[in-house]
Amino acid sequence: MSKKKKTARPKARLPKGLRDVAARELRAMGRMLGIVQEVYESWGFEPLDTPAFEYTDALGKFLPDRDRPNAGVFSFLDDDGQWLSLRYDLTAPLARHVAEHYDALPKPFRRCQWGPVWRNEKPGPGRYREFIQFDADTVGAASLAADAELCMMTADCLERLGIERGQYVVRVNNRKILDGVLVSIGADPDDADFKTMRLAVLRAIDKLDRLGKDAVRDLLGAGRKDVSGDYTRGAGLDSTQAGTVMAFVEAGGGARNEVLARLKSVVANNDLGRQGLDELAAMSGLFDAGGYGQDRIVLDPTIVRGLEYYTGPVFEAELTFDTSGDGGKPVRFGSIGGGGRYDGLVARFKGTEIPATGFSIGVSRLYAALDHLGKLPDEGQIAPVVVLAMDAERMGEYQQMAGELRAAGIRAEVYMGTSAMRAQMKYADRRGAPCVIIEGEDERARGEVTIKDLAEGARLSREIEDNAQWREGRPAQVSVARKDLLASVRDILARPRS
RNA sequence: GCAGCUGUAGCUCAGUUGGUUAGAGCGCCUGAUUGUGGAUCAGGAGGUCCCCCGUUCAAUUCGGGGCAGCUGUACCA
């Protein structure tokens, strides 16, 4: 009863899996995206932007059903009763764009695009419900040269970002080879269960990295129980069949020619497999011709990519270095992007099949990797000079000082609060301001301004113990004539900063 | 989705064997030391002790059920 009356206040909080991005990351991210775009444009890809949400049926097969209108994607109803969804990748909007404007577009159509995408899934460490992707796609080209080009461009791109040769690798495979393997062990592609079985096999192979060979073999067969006792159903292959698939999976390693030779012995006995192998060999030839050796691009049968819609070549870019993260634990960045050929996507709209291939970079992961490497593009942006608001009557004059600095290309701001000088100094310090401009009564009487170098002041103050000395020493500051303000600030900014 | 662990101030955590105004450290705000970032001192803001139901004279504390977070696993177009 006597309890303090509470007004219900909203909690200041962000929905799970979302995050705010502050200045440092925003700036570096912008520069990074700029570099990627520069590389992509130099290879002839044209930038495109599309809206954040679209009609749900235009985005793909994830039509919201009555029970779970938001499974996987974020969806909502338009006022005319049509479902809309936030995009979950940049490929589906591209397919829509191409189908909608097909007649007006140059063919092949080469587009690059970056932007946020949204997935309504359980977030985890480093995994958010909103994240940025950067895609490059060629639509309307059946040639493997288009696929090979994406792999080579990715290598260029990573190097331009400062990731050195040897610290990354692009891995290439071809879906048709695995399909050939499945045919050779007696599966029938026209069988109703084929797609389910193939998906289970793809998922099993995809876990090789994390779970190891034995687990993959279990998943190819009956299934596997994990540590928590949870059971994952397998693909249902018998041990001979599983053995053949494992032979395919283990055909990787070493030079591209060696991998091709090994794969040949596994799949050469059927058409589908041979076709995939030929495609892979052709791409390998293009890598050779382009001068992209196996220190940059390798053939790797374990690359399957989860996506069902890939129809031919698939590729993945991986960072291969380890680095120690917080607490000295080794951090492996792993895959930072992938892609492949998807000849069926545009056909959903057009009826006729239009060949396409693309590559998508997971920008947040790439950013994290560059951050750990200390290779974030540095903008050299420094914090603004702060003009202290010493006297409320003189704000006009303070604005003029800041204006003079800005006109000379120096970031500058007048303190906009109403606090005392001490708090203003604290503010400038917390902002990281290089220096503050002080024009109080004393300076004004002399026609001067005081300029204090905050970095230098911090250095000097480390040697000061006594409070009186601290307050009266006023280190690292000079008074200059008002007209010399700009020149003096320039001097301070020109000093080497640690 | 499934399993395990955890929910007390912005953060890290005490505490209440059920009892009146729930605490600390750090952080934040204001002031003092003649107009100066650190230090010191003084003051202040900030909590439905995750939510609901039950037991009880009395629940932040005990019981049940939710919800949320973390970790693993599954899914990931």
Image: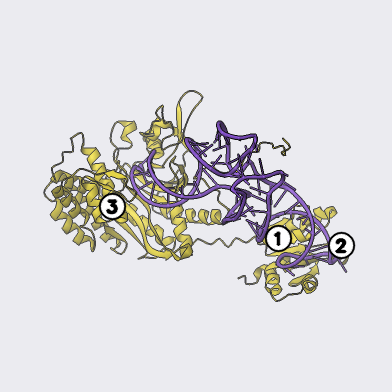
Chain colours: A yellow, B purple
Whether residue A6 appears in this view of the structure is yes
Q: CA distance from mark 3 to mark 2?
A: 72 Å
Q: Quadrant of residue A405?
A: bottom right
At numbered mark 2, what does the secondary structure look like: helix, strand or loop?
Answer: helix
Viewer-nearest residue: A63 or A359: A63
Q: Amino acid at mark 3?
A: Ile
Q: Amino acid at mark 1?
A: Ala
Quarter of the picture containing the C terminus of chain A is: bottom right
| Residue drawn where x is 24% and y is 48% of the image | A219
Residue at the extreme top of the image, as rendered: A80
What number of labels is visible?
3
- Say left or right for A196 vs A480: left
User: Which residue is denoted by mark 3 in the rendering?
Assistant: A303
Q: Which label sits in the foreground, 1 or 2?
A: 1
Q: Relative to residue A149, is residue A321 depicted above or below?
A: below
Q: Find residue A358 and report its horizontal and vertical position in percent.
A: 35, 47
At numbered mark 3, what does the secondary structure look like: helix, strand or loop?
Answer: loop
Q: Are marks 1 and 3 in contact (CB under 8 Å)?
A: no
Query: Which is more N-terminal, label 3 or label 1?
Result: 3
Q: Chain of mark 3?
A: A
Q: Chain of mark 1?
A: A
